[in-house]
Amino acid sequence: MNLKRLYLLFLIVILSSLTVSAVFSEEASTSESPDVSGTLFEHVLDGNTLELFPFVPEITLPHGITMHRLMLVLSVLLITGFYSAWIKRGDLKPKTRTILLESLVIFVRDDIVYPIMGEERGAKWLPFFTTMFLFLSVLNLLGLIPALKTATGNINVTTAMAIVVLLLTFIAGFKGLGFVHFFKNLFPEGTPLGIGIFVMLLELLSLFTKSMVLSLRLFANMFAGHLAILSFLVLIFVITPFFGFISVPFSVFTYTLEVLVGLLQAFVFTLLSCIFIMMASTPEGE
Amino acid sequence: MDLFTLDPGLVIWTWISFGILFFILWKFVFPPLMENLKNREKTIAKSIDDAAAIERRLEEIEAERGELLKKTNSEADEMLLQTRSDAEELKKRLLEKAEKEAEEVLVQARRKAEAEREALLRALQDDLADFVCDASEKVIGSVFITEKEREFTRELVKEL
């Protein structure tokens, strides 16, 4: 049994390395000089062509639609499709697939929103954070499917999400504390006026930097992760096709890691957003 | 396309996608989902309570059963003992009765045998006296023995 598995793995490695080298050779032959970083970035950055299979002509997307935009739409369709189809009212004995979908919501509820915001307040915010977690998770994982791309590997997408969080931080803060009290909350008590104003400005700035960091963290993780998988595969082309015996297992390992990182980054983004919004709308010392 | 190219279109697409997704989930998916979860939690809590109540009742029934079994066992033991002692008594009584009857039968038989023996002896004595008288008549010849002498002979035979 184990020997059979080993044989299968060996076969997969050989076939993958041959395919990868064939794809890269084809790409290299089309351009005059092989541009490794160009090839790499082409697979990660946004574009308007969809390459479904090697050796099959690529599909050019309609004007105005790029791969990352397509991924955004696809994620919305996937999430709404699965949730609308599998969640039925009054379902007391759910099937495994329904439990799986529900468990994601329960995870966001019990591990992110309720512990931070409390039950009463958390119940109002739960749909928002669940949507955020699902949206980011699906976007992160879609990029792991061959031929598709990671929209969260584009800084515009992550920044857009971070801006939403930033705006909500201010809105929740103004609503929870009042306009004046929100800024007063940033002023540390018992400090001289000069230092206090300076700290207040720093705190205000930190609200922006926190959101920016949120955006950069997600972008960098997703971009770097996918680039790492591709870099391992590109080595086959750069060094020798036989390097596939090392590259393919490594990229498979990185791929597995990326699944974890994709979910983890969605979790981190949601968790930190929740904390920022809660912190901005809670009086200091509570 | 560069790594950090600003793409306002994509930003707007992200907001719109996120907004649509949020609206759909918030409006159409969350109400049934949360209701299901709440109902299920309630049902599970009720089932757990019910199960605990059933377990308690089961324990009670088990205890009652044990008690009943103990009581029945002791009753059965008592009944068995009673039956055994009754049987012993009955046996004793029957044995006594049988012994008594056997003794009575024996006494009666003995009495009857005695009476028969007496009658037999008497008949033998009479016969012997008659025989002696007849024999004497034959020896003496013509001389007849009187009734008085015959009676006397009988008395003699009795004394033998």
Image (tube, coloured by chain):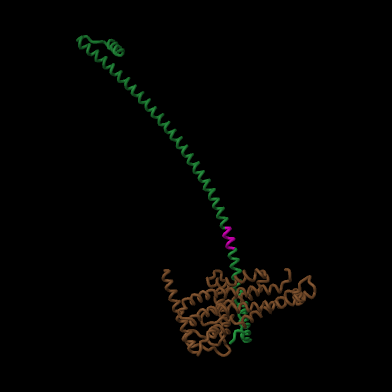
Q: Is residue A142 visible?
A: no
Locate the N terminus of chain B by quadrant. Answer: bottom right
**x, y (%) of residue B41?**
60, 66
**x, y (%) of residue B99?**
40, 30
In this structure image, what is the colour of chain A?
Answer: brown
Locate the C terminus of chain B by quadrant. Answer: top left
- Determine whether B88 is above or below A15 in the image: above
Q: Which secondary structure class fits the magenta region best? A: helix
Q: A11 or A121, which lies in front?
A: A11
Question: Can residue A256 be found in the magenta stretch?
Answer: no
Magenta region, residue range = B46-53
Query: Would you identify the image quadrant in which residue A37 lies?
Result: bottom right
**Residue shown at the point (49%, 42%) measured from the top left:** B77
Query: Would you identify the image quadrant in which residue A185 lies?
Result: bottom right
Q: B145 or A127, which lies in front?
A: A127
**Residue shown at the point (57%, 55%) measured from the top left:** B57
In this structure image, what is the colour of chain B?
Answer: green
